[in-house]
Image (cartoon, rainbow, N blue to C red):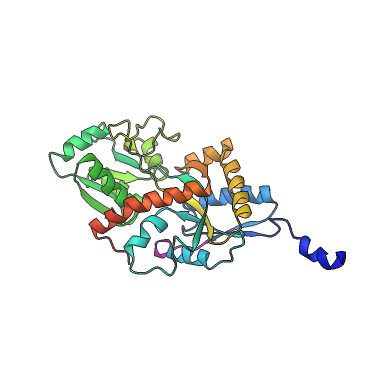
Amino acid sequence: MLALCLPCVVQAAFPDRPFRIIVSNPPGGPVDVMLRVLANKLAEAWNQPVVVENRPGASGIISTGALVKSPADGYNLGMVVASALTIVPFAVDHLPYDPRKDLQPVSLVARTPFLFIVRSDSPFKTWDDFVQASKQRELAVGSFTRGTAFHLIWEQTARRAGIKALYVPSSSSGKTQNDLIGGQLDIALDAPSSSQALIQAGRLRPLAITSPARFAGLPDTPTLEESGMAGYAPQPWIGLMAPAGVPADRIAFIQQSVAKILQDPAMKAQMAALGMIPIGGTPGELDATIEHDRAEMEPLIKELGIRLE
């Protein structure tokens, strides 16, 4: 009898084999670099390989589609940027998956504040200088392509501040920065990791950052809230997701491991250099964040008539 029952109770401990984390970002960018550092630390903690798989393209639809088709065993995960779940679903005609039903939150990994920058000789010394000037004449603000998180945060900010400006989309941060320095733009919205070198070189100057508290990488830059926009701190997030159906104990194990690593001072410093604020939130916190952002983005996307190809 004992021999017959033995296979029923002897189970391999989790984890006992390699993990895979799918990401929509191409190799070498801030999200990819952060993920690879995190993956290495998780591999050490779990004594199992953690392989990063880059699946760029189609605004995250390719990578998210690959994730939802993966086995719901806890060994297949995805590092997902906010726009894939809070912008794309409202800006495309059809998704090959249901982002609410087919995915399971694991951890809110990080927030990525955005930065309003001007050229070094700009007459705008403060955020309020820009706001007041925008009410007197049409100014040009540059950032990434329409329908990106940068574009929608600009539109959201403009509405809250009661201002208007000509939005000039660009395919790259470098082009936007060159146009700003060259005088074709009055202000730009960028990621700290992209603009920090030119700020340190004295060619660009930050006016305000969207984080709720001052960012460690740019401690002298005031927040939008400090600059007069009370209660407003829009920050896209990066989250770890899994296919729906992973056992709760495995989700909890992974989340706790991630949260512990994100509290390490060396990891915090590395993420600050990449323009990120480590969070390490629970599955419930990530789920609430997704629902909050979807509720804000859906009407704005419809108002602007944004469609992604």
The front one of 230 and 37 is 230
Q: Quadrant of residue 4?
A: bottom right
Q: Quadrant of residue 75?
A: bottom right
Q: Position of residue 298 (x, y in %)?
A: 31, 56
Q: Quadrant of residue 94?
A: bottom left
Magenta segment boundaries in residue numbering: 54-60
- On the question of residue 309 being in view, the answer is yes
Look at 46% across and 52% down and name the residue there.
Answer: 29
Q: Quadrant of the C terminus?
A: bottom left
The front one of 182 and 99 is 99
Look at 34% across and 55% down and name the residue there.
Answer: 148
Q: Position of residue 99 (x, y in %)?
A: 44, 61
Task: Determine whether 51 is above or below 133 in the image.
Answer: below
Q: Quadrant of the N terminus?
A: bottom right
In the visual, does 218 lie left or right of 205? right
- On the question of residue 30 being in view, the answer is no
Is 276 one of the magenta-colored residues?
A: no
Residue reaching furthest front?
1
Q: Position of residue 292 (x, y in %)?
A: 38, 49
Is 56 one of the magenta-colored residues?
A: yes
In the visual, does 298 lie left or right of 214? left
Task: Determine whether 203 is above or below 98 in the image.
Answer: above
Residue reaching furthest left?
136
Q: Position of residue 24 (x, y in %)?
A: 47, 59
The front one of 222 and 177 is 222
